[in-house]
Amino acid sequence: MLEQSPLAVDETSRGVSRRMVVKTAAWSVPTVAVAVGIPQAAHASPGDGVVLFTSAFDGIGSGLPSNFSVRTGATTSAVGTAAAFATAAAPWNNTGGGFKNVASADGLTAASDTTAQNASTDRAVAVRQVTATDTGVAFTIDSLSTADVTGVTVSFKAQSLDASSPRQTTWTVDAFVGATRITSGTTFTTGNSTFGSTSVAAIFPATIENQTGVTIRIACLTATTGTGNRATTGIDDLTVSATSTV
Ligand SMILES: [Ca+2]
């Protein structure tokens, strides 16, 4: 299988380098040069599923995963500025604002107390909004490459975790390539005195494909509605997937 390596590399510049593929392969393994010259699949085949990012957030007691950040100041024209994340386990109904390490809703109920929440090894990254963060909070996946993929999809569990929070927050799933915002069209809400976990899948248009430095974002970009305290919103089991085109 040694002859596969140069062929696989040259697949990235296909159309320009057929001669190079043959020449490289012939140089490496002269006895099979003719066979290698016949087009054949590289190890990434069209239609293969590709995972660009995935995290269950169960290790956030030690910090956030690589290529993931939490932000404030998010708007429709600005990705936002990286914000602090508190690694200590926090209960859902703590009204102090900030990004926190909380128990996932999975396996628990709205009535699960702080002891039960702290005992859960299934963690979620969360934010408790307060007056100063009524808008502009965001969870972001950073520095993604979407080269040679199509159908970029972000899927996750959106969790509304404090049933005693009457205000409602609307969340938007979007992306940035440089200064250009790309919307998925997907929104969801938390708060409104609800508790629960909802599976969300947002599919991005083709404008997100074949780019580098892509940021995918789950953000609150509009004011909360209602009165009283604000939601604790958790994100769990977050994956960005796509389909290979090469
Ligand atoms: Ca988790």
Image (cartoon, grey):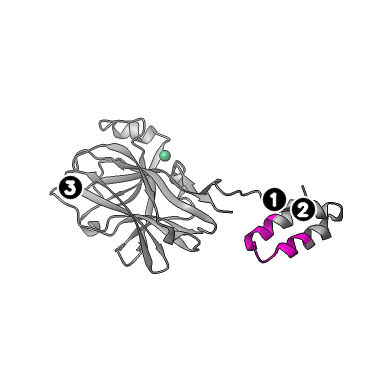
Question: Residue 242, which numbered label?
Answer: none
Q: Residue at x 22, y 58 (%)?
A: 222
Dot 2 falls on a residue whose secondary structure is helix
Q: Residue at x 83, y 51 (%)?
A: 32
Q: Which residue is mark 2?
A: 36
Residue 226 on image: x %, y %: 13, 49
Residue 97 appears in the figure: no
* Quadrant assignment, res 134: bottom left
| Dot placed on the residue nearer the N-terminal end, 2 or 3 | 2
Classed neighbour count for the residue bearing mark 1: other residues with Cα under 10 Å, few (<14), some (14–19), many (≥20): few
Main SS of the magenta part reads helix
Which of the two discs, 1 and 3, sits closer to the camera? Answer: 1
Q: Residue furthest left?
A: 227
Three-letter residue code for mark 3:
Arg
Q: Is the CB–ligand 1 distance for label 2 below 8 Å?
A: no
Classed neighbour count for the residue bearing mark 3: other residues with Cα under 10 Å, few (<14), some (14–19), many (≥20): some
* Quadrant assignment, res 10: bottom right
Residue 16 on image: x %, y %: 66, 66
* Quadrant assignment, res 207: bottom left
Classed neighbour count for the residue bearing mark 2: other residues with Cα under 10 Å, few (<14), some (14–19), many (≥20): many
Three-letter residue code for mark 2:
Val
| Dot placed on the residue nearer the N-terminal end, 1 or 3 | 1
Q: Which residues are magenta?
A: 8-22
Dot 3 falls on a residue whose secondary structure is loop
Q: CA distance from mark 2 to mark 1?
A: 8 Å
Q: CA distance from mark 2 to mark 3?
A: 63 Å
Horizontally, residue 26 falls left or right of residue 235, namely right
Which of the two discs, 2 and 3, sits closer to the camera? Answer: 2
Q: Which residue is mark 3?
A: 167
Q: Nearer the viewer, residue 141 or 181?
A: 181
Q: Which residue is mark 1?
A: 40
Residue 160 appears in the figure: yes
